[in-house]
Amino acid sequence: FGPARYDPDHRQDKIDSYRPIEEKDPMPTSHNFRADQNCPRFHSTTKGSQLSITMRMSRIILIAATASIGAVSDAFKFMSNWQPPKILTDQQKLKIAKTQERFGDKKLVVITGCSSGLGRETVKNLLASDEYHVVGAVRDIDKMEAVAEIDGFNMDNFHIMECELNSFESVHRFCDELKEYQMAKPIDRLICNAGVYQPSLDYAKWSVDGHEQTMQINFLSHFLMISEVIEGMKEAPEPRVIMVGSVTGNDNTVGGGGVYPIADLKQL
C-alpha cells in the first residue's frame, strides 16, 4: 500500500511486519481496495478484525442468553410443584363422589379421648362452628354415645370409633378402619388428647404390650397413630398434629406438682 517500494529480495514485507503498528502503512482506501485485496497483510488484518468482532458478538449473545434463561427460570418457578392431571378410573370417581357426599367441604378432625374433659369441650366447639367433621377415638363407645346425646352433638358431623390406646393392636385396627371411613378425604387435624394420670400409685400398671400404662397411652400409642396416618395427611392443604399436655405439663396445677405426689415415670 502507499508508494511502491523496490525490494528485489521481497524482504520489505518482513521488515514491515516488525515495525510498530503506528508506523505501518494505512489500510487500503475504497478506491484501491480491489487492487490491493490480495495483499497478505490486508488479509491477516481483516481476518483479525473479523475474529475480534465475532468474539465480542459471541460474548454479547452469551450474556443475553444467560439473562434470558434466568428470566425464564424465574417466570416458571410457580410450576415447580406442577404435576400432570391424573386420569381417574370409574371406581376412583365413585369414591370421590361418596367422599364429597359424606364430608362436603368440611375439614376432617380426629381426636382421641373426647368423652370427658378437654376432649369433650373441644368436640363441642368444633361441631358448633359447623366447619369440621369430627371422628372421636375412644375406648368406651357407650359412654361417648351418652355424652353426645347429653351435649346435643350433630351426629351428621360426628363419628365415634373404638380405640384402646393401651393396646398397639387396637391402634392398628383403628387406623385401618379410619382409612376406610375417610375414603378420599385427608385428615386436616389430628388431636392427640387422651391420657392417663396415676400419680398416687406406688406400683406400675402395665399395658397388654408390656409397657407402663402412662408411657404407652400418653406417648407410644399416639406416636404409632401419627406414624400410621401422617403420610395421608400431606394431601390436606394445611395439616396439623396437635399434642395436648394439659395438667401434668403445668407445675402450677395440682396434677403438675402443686400438691404431692408429683407425677413422674418412677424408675422408667
Image (tube, grey):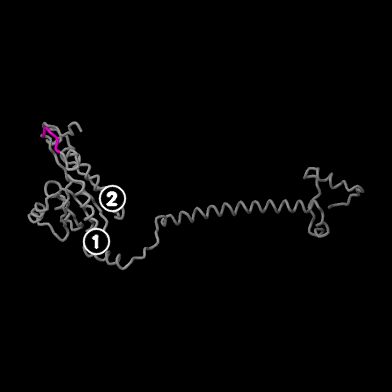
**Mark 2 highlights which residue?**
230
- Residue 120 in sight in this render: no
Mark 2, Cα crowd under 10 Å, few <14 / some 14-19 / many 20+, is some
Left or right, 203 with reference to 92: left
Prevalent SS, magenta region: loop
Residue drawn at x 17%, y 37% as measured from the top left: 250
Q: Amino acid at mark 2?
A: Ile
**Circle 2 — which element?**
helix
Image quadrant for the C terminus? top left
Image location of residue 36, percent across then percent down: 82, 56
Mark 2 vs 1, N-terminal side: 1
Determine which quarter of the picture holds residue 146. Answer: bottom left
- Residue 224 vs residue 149, the one in the foreground: 224
Gap between marks 2 and 1 measured at Cα: 21 Å
- Residue 247 vs residue 212, the one in the foreground: 212
- Queried whether the magenta region covers residue 13, the answer comes back as no
Image location of residue 92, percent across then percent down: 30, 65
The segment highlighted magenta reads: 201-205
Question: What number is the disc on residue 105?
Answer: 1
**Circle 1 — which element?**
loop
